[in-house]
Amino acid sequence: MTTETRFEVQTYSICDGWTNSWFITDKHGSRPETFASYAEAEAEINDFLEDIQLEIEAGDRSAEEGFGPDEFCIVEID
């Protein structure tokens, strides 16, 4: 049986180190989100950062509550 390569976006926390904190929530509950390709995961990070920047520009979030691309990494998983 061949397993498909998947990727996850990880963020760093002092307690847990680098972990996948991106989740999908649907009628089946909540589960870690994974991506079919590195590019798909990277696009998700870029979309997230763009949304955060728009919130800052709209005054819904302070600049100190923003994120940078260096706060995320993409990891290939089994």
Image (cartoon, rainbow, N blue to C red):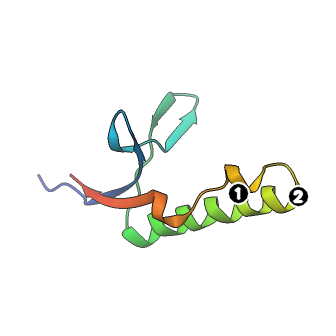
The location of residue 13, given as percent across then percent down, is 41, 41
On screen, residue 7 versus residue 39, left or right, reads left
The location of residue 65, given as percent across then percent down, is 68, 49
Q: Secondary structure at mark 2?
A: helix
Residue appearing at x 38%, y 69% in the figure:
38
Residue ID for mark 2: 58
The location of residue 71, given as percent across then percent down, is 47, 57
What amino acid is found at the position of numbered circle 1 in the picture?
A: Ile
Return the residue nearer the eye: 26 or 64.
64
Return the residue nearer the eye: 64 or 77.
64
Return the residue nearer the eye: 47 or 40.
47
What amino acid is found at the position of numbered circle 2 in the picture?
A: Ala
Residue appearing at x 74%, y 56% in the figure:
63
* Image-quadrant location for residue 49: bottom right
Residue appearing at x 79%, y 49% in the figure:
61
The label number, if any, that marks residue 52 in the structure image: 1
